[in-house]
Image: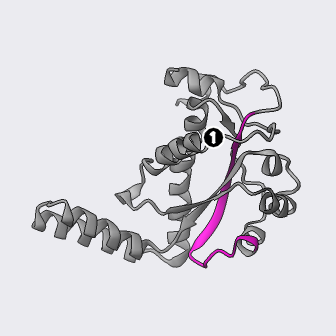
Amino acid sequence: MEFKDIVQKRYAVKKFDGKAVPQEKVDELLEMIRLAPSSYNLQPWKIKVIEDQETKVKLLAESYNQQQVSSCSHLLVFCADTDYETNLQKLEEQMRAAGGDKEKLDAYFGMMKGGMGSKSKEEVAVWAKNQVYLALGNALNGAASLGFNSCPMEGFNPEGYRKILDLPENLIPCVLCPIGYPADTPRPKLRFEKEDVLF
């Protein structure tokens, strides 16, 4: 399927049929998400993959009882990771091990450390949350390319999720992506005309 067909056919599923997506397909999707772009290539996200029904049911009440959460095959909880220092150190180690030019790498990481270090805690959180949506885009279109579907969801209680999933402070749940096989029918795709979004 060509990419233009994927974006045309993809839609936000409101109810899944409960059938499990094969693990190899889930693994393919997670690899697509892993390869998403990010600012500075710092990849400031962590994804909790939930497939056991008991946990999904617990999270349902923290998701305003939206049935996508409990009827999906797997629930992907995208969290912004505000611990940029750890990711920066890991990236620097990888790039230096790959044999890049030392002076260029020194300058590059000096620039990144200065840029990130100048941000407040709140600014880092906003920055990290923005990056998560790049990974989410790969998840949405990737699922459609693999023969199943998804539903991006911001309608949930992040603190409720934090408590149930016992998340550390540096991880901020910011968007959900249940995946599975749809039990509903998509409506015709409605979008603004090109002239409405270009100026």
Q: Which image quarter: residue 105?
A: bottom left
On screen, residue 69 above or below 156: above
Residue behind mark 1:
22
- Residue 166 is covered by the magenta coloring: yes
Q: Which image quarter: residue 107?
A: bottom left
Q: Secondary structure at mark 1?
A: loop
On screen, residue 7 above or below 50: above
Specify start and end residues of the magenta stretch as a single range.
164-181
Q: Is residue 71 left or right of residue 119?
A: right
Q: Nearer the viewer, residue 74 or 43?
A: 74
Q: Is residue 68 left or right of residue 106?
A: right
Residue 134, image x, y percentages: 51, 48
Q: Which image quarter: residue 137?
A: top right
Residue 170, image x, y percentages: 56, 76
Q: Nearer the viewer, residue 30 or 24?
A: 24
Few, some or many residues within 10 Å of mark 1 (<14, 14–19, 20+): few
Residue 165, image x, y percentages: 70, 70
The residue at the point 60 percent across, 45 percent down is 23
Q: Can residue 115 be seen?
A: no
